[in-house]
Image (cartoon, helix red, strand yellow):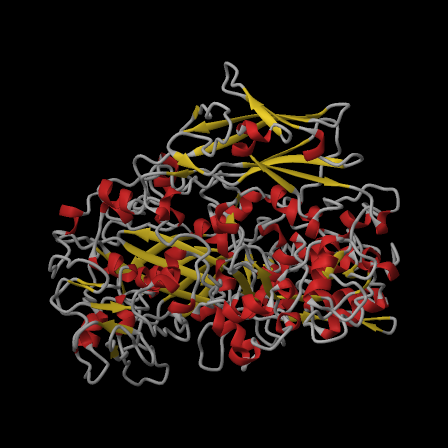
Amino acid sequence: MQEKLLKRFSAFVIASTAATALLLGGCEGDRGPRGAQGPAGTGAFTNLSSSTADQQANITFDQQNSTVNSVTIKSPPVVTFTLKTANGQPVEGIGRRNASGQLTNLAFTIAKLVPASNGTPSHWVSYIVTTAPTDGSAPSATRPTRDREGTLESLGNGKFRYTFARDIKLVQSQVNAMTFSGNNRRNDLGDLTYDPSLTHRLVIEYGGNIANTSPQLIYKNAINIVYDFVPATGARVTSSTTGQAERNIVLTKYCNECHGNPGDPNDLNQQGWGLGITTPHAGRVDTRYCVVCHTSQRAYGRAISTPTNGAFTGNTYVTADTTTVDPGSATDEVQVLGEFVTLIHKIHMGENLTETGYNYAGIHFNEVAYPESAALCRKCHRGETAQQLAVTPQGDNWRTMPNRKACGSCHDNIHFATGTNTTGPAHPVYTNDASCNACHTPTAITESHAQALVSPLNPAAPAGLTNFEYQLSSATVDGSNNLTIKFRILGNGTPITLATPAAGLTTALTGFTGSPSFLLAYAKPQLETGGAVPADYNNLGKVAAQPDLISITTLLNTNNAAVGNITGPDSSGTYTATINSASAFPVGAQMRAVGIQSYFTQTGFDASIAGRHTRAVIIPVTGDAVRRTVVDPDKCRNCHEFFEAHGGQRVYQTQLCVTCHNPNLTTSGRTITDAKLAGFAFTPIQLGILTTWDPNFATNRLTPGYALTLPEFSNNFKDLIHGIHAGATRTNPIRDVRNGPGTGVTLIEGSEITFPNMLGNCDACHITQQSYTPDVIEALRPRALPSTQAVADGAIPTTATINAARATVPNATDLVVAPVTAACVACHDTPLAKAHMNANGAQLGAALAGPSNTNMGVARSTLPSATEQCTLCHGQGRVADVIIMHGQNRPQLVPSSLTTGSSAARMVKLLLNW
């Protein structure tokens, strides 16, 4: 299914400058990842009021030593706090205000924790639900907001005192005295009684937009100081506090695994960074802050939406399955979509929600495709180890405290007040949460959310299913070119025993169908490399540059003795597979590698879980060069958990992905026959995509040769993955059409994809910063291969000639893009960026003539081996170092030799400020 990821709310900035007569247009980006510490202010402190906008944008605050010193609540709350930079300097100059007298970058909020009752979990109630007029007029009610109108005093040495404008001890009486009507419902604001015996949460925010900057700059490293305490005693509440209620369920660090950079995975006290600049709230970067504003009080002032036949229309801020007038009623069942638990669950449940038409502040939940299973609750909720419980003591609530609000936010097919279930058997009628855990015990909830495949966040699969592990210990080629592979397969941790070899054998393992396969990848010299072995697999001589696959079942079937055989196991459970020379690597192949991919399917189980998808593994042939590694598959796991491609045939291991997705591979859509295109039953999603490309697709697809008008795109791994993750930010989002096996057709429409992280955060996938610089590819010349954009035989294309060209890749007439440029243009594809690349040796070309949608490339035979000049500016330590331009430690790598008055320095300043 076509992926649609949640649209980011961050700005997309284009960096440009003048260097001689050129416009540098290849440095686009979003708001950018964490920057480096800005320069210090005058003296032994950092003064933000006199710092430049760039210095403010890049300042890093000390998350541990910026603290609340004291809180007193005798009338308006009075807070003393200390703010320091990461290098230990006190911060001054933080009191900037807007024309309305509100602090612009500094804000405060405070809420109380209402204890759990009758099965209903504890919940936050914000006191900051009134305006604070500065003209003497009476306050009015609002949804939860921030206190920015109070008095700020500098006490010196980075210490400040802030007196709230609102007296939280009076808020209840003030609100009770107000008049309410329409959607302004008093009950939505909750019980605002000040209770000093309860746990309270104070949050101090410093961040947000930087004044007088265009395009708008933000504090990339905003700080939220979160302080839980009991006003009656003044005691701070932490995970080690006994006898005092707290509510810490989700850790920002876990969110930043997808939405930013999680930092050290072994240090759960390190929050990581990124969340705030991938949401609408640049200064709010801690989920502990999110929850005290995103409370059920966000229902105030909002109309209540009810669905018709399961579909909502218009805005959906508060929803109910039946007519209700009071979301606060104990008997009515509503969902406040702005409440954190409901909002986040619905966003991540996305396209799996039953009801449709959701529209919360422009977020269309039904159009969100989460990149892993929404049932994998441990992705956000972790509370099973002492280390996890120390930071999220209530992290296990997802299975220990079931309730209508949390469960109903995902399972919106169930209406608890009536027992109606639109997709299954009726549910018992529940008008409160007291009985939920009678059926939904921790064990039952864990089992019902268990995934079919074991992974770090899903430690146990449903009962009875076998989980496999593939192990390769060696691959050797003898003097006769026969390949010998030593391998072992574990089932639930124990070596399995394969079927005894026999004639006609079709089942490799009792109780299972199908089997894993050995993948044989290699490289041989081709046109661009002369006699050198390419730095990438190219599987020269194979159709579409694809490696050979030989299944374990094939080798166990003695009728295939000419192909090879399997013997063993030995005492450790290790088997020996022999693949004879004619079916092994071609003579002269180098950089040979053997992988195991695909899977067993367990009989007796539902098809949805029977496929025992297993991590692929790959090793080099002994003595051969090893293909470089630039992507860390564990980082892919941060968003995808159990990353699967091609129906689970290839899982997790990106080093195996590059054996097929090599520089000579392109999409195969133009090979689709007229009969297949005319007869294929496209899904509604596929038709929607194709109709967007061609409004008359339904009739035009019957035109002979129509498939030749479909786009062709490089399927080299770096081009494909960059293009997918750049998604809708590209000027020309990728359109990927593949002629699938049998009657299948696969489509990717890039305009519907948005990366949930920051696009410039290359560390989200790459093993190191240095692994994605142009220096890496430059060092591989002349072995680095260009990316094939379209296969061509030089004639007017037909289905037959395209198929013939794919069988002989690489062809001299193929359209290609040079290797460094291919990596960059997959994200940076604006006309300005392409012009810059072309002016510096990229040779993007005029693309394929005729009806194809291929939009760049020059004939392979005309591409010189080394015209790209990217490293001159974008190499490490150079004036526009790619690491700096992607937002990593930007100011630190500017050469110290540049002076303020030089043209080079002016270029650097412009780059850094944009």
Q: Nearer the viewer, residue 250 or 613?
A: 613
Question: Which quadrant is the C terminus positioned in?
Answer: bottom right
Of the pair 227 and 20, the residue shown nearer to us = 20
Q: Is residue 41 left or right of residue 513?
A: right
Q: Residue at x 55, y 69 (%)?
A: 677
Q: Horizontal and vertical percent for residue 559?
A: 56, 30
Image position, residue 58 (x, y; %): 61, 60
The residue at 48%/82% (across/down) is 99
Looking at the image, residue 537 sits to the left or right of residue 211; the answer is: right
- Residue 817 in percent (x, y) is at 77, 61
Could one spot residue 65 in this view of the protein? no
Q: Is residue 473 visible?
A: yes
Residue closest to the eye, 851 or 339: 851
Q: Quarter-wise, where is residue 112 in the image?
A: bottom left
Residue visible at 72% across and 71% down in the picture:
855
Furthest residue toward top: 571
Q: How many marks?
A: 0
Please state which of residues 482 and 907 is positioned toward the viewer in this rendering.
Answer: 482
In the displayed structure, 46 sits above or below 734; it is above
Residue 512 point in image, percent of width and height = 40, 35
